[in-house]
Amino acid sequence: MLEVRNLRKTFKSGDDDVNAVDDISFKVPTGMFAAIVGKSGSGKSTLLALLGALDKPTAGSIVIDTKDITSVSDGQLIKYRRNDIGFVFQQYNLVPNLTALENVMLPLEFAGVPASKRRQRAEDLLVQVGLNEEKQSRLPARLSGGEQQRVAIARALANSPKLILADEPTGNLDTQTGQLIFDLLHSLSRTENTTIIAVTHDLSIAGKTDKVFKLQDGKLTH
Amino acid sequence: MSVIKRGVKNAFRNGLRTSAVVLILALSIGLSLSMLVANKAVEGRIADLKTEVSTTISVNPAGSRGSEGGGEPLTNDDMNTIAKLAHVDSADGFTNFMLQTEGNNGQANMMIRGRGAVEPGKTNLVSSIDAGTLGQRFNSSGDGNEAPADIKLPIRGIGFNGSVSPEGKALNITDGRLLKDGDTYSAVIGKQLAEKNGLKVGSTFTAYDKTFTVVGIADQGNAFENDTVMIPLEVAQELTGFSEEVSPIVVDVDSIDNLESVISSIKKALGEDNVDVTSSQENVRQAIESLKSVQKVSIVGFVASLAAAAMIVLMVMFVIVRERRREIGVLKAIGGSNRTIVTQFVVEAIVLVVVGGVIGLGTAALGSGAIANALVSSNTSSGSTSSDSAGTQTRGMSSSSAGPRGGGGPVSVRFDDSGDAVDNTKELVGKVTTSIGWTTLLYGLLGMVAIAILGSAIPAWLIAKVRPAEVLRGE
């Protein structure tokens, strides 16, 4: 269970304070696929960064299961990101000089998984997202956008996180590929019993998720 | 793939840039190592020069050399004053005299260093040197009359109590012993003189109507010095009638490094206008000073090259970190710790430096000799200088510190056609031989690691500052 309570993130803009996220509270049960929608500048990415412990809130709390991640040390936050969170980015953000397989092995290495197990786990995940052995050994530049995003999803799943945060996961893909990636995420949330929160501006995709949170000027409107 | 492997792989991520960086680093590190090698080589050459030379100073009355010039004679008190100065191992005063074989047909009076024209003492010894043309010439009366054909050359006599000859050479006693305190009518005899007169340790001979006992035989390696009678200073002073006077005083300094300061101290103690203080090792000292300046230059060069290499690494790593800011953010977002990511970048820097270092080492191996000799060459003077303090050895009998007949002693100054002394510092320094030893390699390795760490320090700090949230903001 993910529970967000009275979450606020304030940025300085000149002499003014701007609330990018303004007193938001919501709950997402384990295994749910939720979407956050909203216009550009509505605070979607800021909310995602807070949920992923990439940034610290000005106020409020984020509780995953029973752990409040807003009150833990930086070291524990790294562990949280490493073990409990998986990220999928709009621009894939794969390491360009590592093969698809090596990219998926990275979070496993950070988590201290032995080398032999890393490779097996990464290969299994890549097969699961639809990349064969030949494509697994390719550098990201030699993969299509959709394939790169599949690698990114496999990487996000590597340490079996409780929560996958996807920032516009279909934003750089054509409609058909975007749909395929969305379906993949959806099925993974079922098979892996992983909570997925995806930021998107594509309402047709958002409409297929279990729950939609609508953000406007940093506030939840729906 | 471990963080180390990833760091190594990243070092070659951009082939063109890596090649350029490695080349520049190789030049920088090569120059740095060359400077280090040059420094070590010069250090070795300085040590060699120091062991090759003696550290003696000759003190004469100001304006006096041999039997020429003027000034006031030096005394036993002057000798004792010098002996007490810092860094002085010993100060030995000498008094010179001449012995004429009884019944010889030579000159009635002879020019003696520090004595002028005096009547030589009579002896039953015969010089071991045949007069020859030079002997005939030197002993002619000067009024056009040649010396008699059967002339017997006078014998050189020295009164002193030390172990070093007036030429600055340690006495090489081949039999018996040196003169010691308490000796009176005892003598050390030159080897050839002893052989000529059938003298051995314990034999006796007469001089100044006194009977002397031979206590030692000395072999100084040349016929001139081996035709010498050495007796205690006080006895020589008494017999010649010049009690308390010494000329010259030969000072042994503890180290060539202190030669200059002892010369200054002597001048200060005895009065700059009263004495001429010269060192036959002046050129060697100048050579060592030149080499020391090369050492300083090489150290500056070493540090500057190392700093340049560190700056290169710093700039390159700075650019790399800026370029990969998003990637760093991603690595942090997926669980990479600062330590892991910094390690990856430091490994990358180390790889660049090591590759550059290996090529630099090759460059140093090939070029250090030339660089060292170029440094030495540019820091050692050549050409003519005045003979003022360049050395005590000039030409002819009157200028010798050795005694009345000149010659002998280590000749450290050459003369050009115009009669000026030629500074032979360059020849003394010679060619510096370089080699890359384990110590240099160790220093080089430490230097390379230092470069990599210094060069990565600021980029590492930048890495730590990267916030993973920026990855999302950049979308």
Image (cartoon, grey):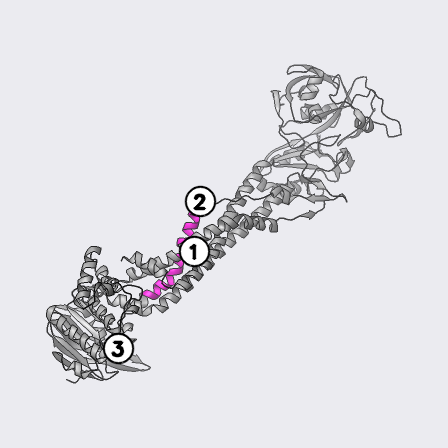
Horizontal and vertical percent for residue A103? 25, 64
Vertical position of residue B279 compared to residue B318: above or below: above
Single out the mark in the foreground, 3 or 2: 3
Single out the mark in the foreground, 1 or 2: 1
Q: CA distance from mark 1 to mark 2?
A: 19 Å
Q: Residues within 10 Å of mark 1 (few under 14, many from 20)?
A: many
Horizontal and vertical percent for residue B98? 75, 25
Circles 3 and 1, Cβ within 8 Å, touching? The answer is no
Please name the amino acid that badge 1 sits on: Gly
Disc 3 designates what residue? A172
Residue sitting nearer the eye, B281 or B373: B373
Vertical position of residue A1 compared to residue B188: above or below: below
Disc 2 designates what residue? B439
Task: Please name the residue shown 27% across and 63% down the image.
Answer: A99
Please name the amino acid that badge 3 sits on: Asn
Circles 1 and 2, Cβ within 8 Å, touching? The answer is no
Single out the mark in the foreground, 3 or 1: 3
For the N terminus of chain B, which image quadrant? Answer: bottom left
Horizontal and vertical percent for residue A37? 19, 82
Q: CA distance from mark 3 to mark 2?
A: 58 Å
Residue B368 colored in magenta in the image = no
Residue A149 placement, left or right of B371: left
Q: CA distance from mark 3 to mark 1?
A: 41 Å
Vertical position of residue A196 compared to residue A204: above or below: above
In what element is the residue under mark 1?
Answer: helix
Q: Quadrant of residue B324?
A: bottom left
Disc 1 designates what residue? B356
